[in-house]
Image (cartoon, rainbow, N blue to C red):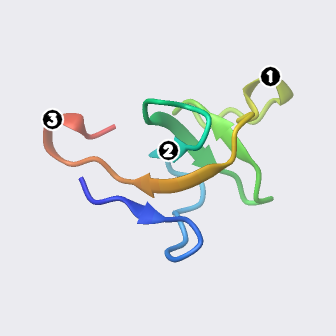
């Protein structure tokens, strides 16, 4: 898996990816909504309870057995 910095390479909108944050120790599944908000999970559900509390700094699309 190759990690890209969010400020260098824009993540895909509306597709679950793995993200790293400064606050979390492990990567988490999240997706970027068209309005620019990040939501936790891979179900593409946009609700206030699913808003990602941390700011993602890096993202990647897993490959092979890790594919979402």
52 relative position to 27: left or right = right
Q: What is the CA distance from the residue labelled 1 to the residue labelled 2? A: 19 Å
Q: What is the CA distance from the residue labelled 3 to the residue labelled 2? A: 19 Å
Q: What is the CA distance from the residue labelled 3 to the residue labelled 1? A: 29 Å
- Residue nearest the viewer, comparing 59 with 67: 59
Residue 58 locus on image (x, y percent): 49, 56
Closer to viewer: mark 1 or mark 2: 2
Q: Looking at the image, is 20 positioned above or below residue 24?
A: below
Mark 3 or mark 1: whose residue is earlier in sequence: 1
Q: Which residue appears at 61% of the width and 49% of the height? A: 56
Residue 11 locus on image (x, y percent): 52, 64
Which quarter of the rendering shows the C terminus? top left
Closer to viewer: mark 3 or mark 2: 2
Return the residue at label 1.
49
Q: Which residue appears at 49% of the width and 45% of the height? A: 19
Mark 1 crowd level (few <14, some 14–19, many ≥20, 10 Å Cα): few
Q: Secondary structure at mark 1?
A: helix
Image disc number at residue 65 = 3
Mark 3 or mark 2: whose residue is earlier in sequence: 2
Residue 50 in which image quadrant: top right
Return the residue at label 2.
20
Q: Which residue appears at 51% of the width and 33% of the height? A: 42
24 relative position to 1: left or right = right
Q: Which residue appears at 41% of the width and 65% of the height? A: 4
């Amino acid at each position: 898996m190759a990690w890209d910095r969010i400020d260098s390479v824009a993540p895909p909108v509306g597709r679950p990816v793995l993200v790293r944050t400064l606050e979390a120790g492990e990567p988490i599944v999240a997706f970027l909504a068209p309005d620019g908000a990040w939501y936790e999970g891979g179900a593409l559900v946009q609700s206030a309870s699913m808003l990602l509390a941390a700011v993602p700094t890096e993202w990647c699309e897993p490959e092979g057995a890790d594919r979402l």
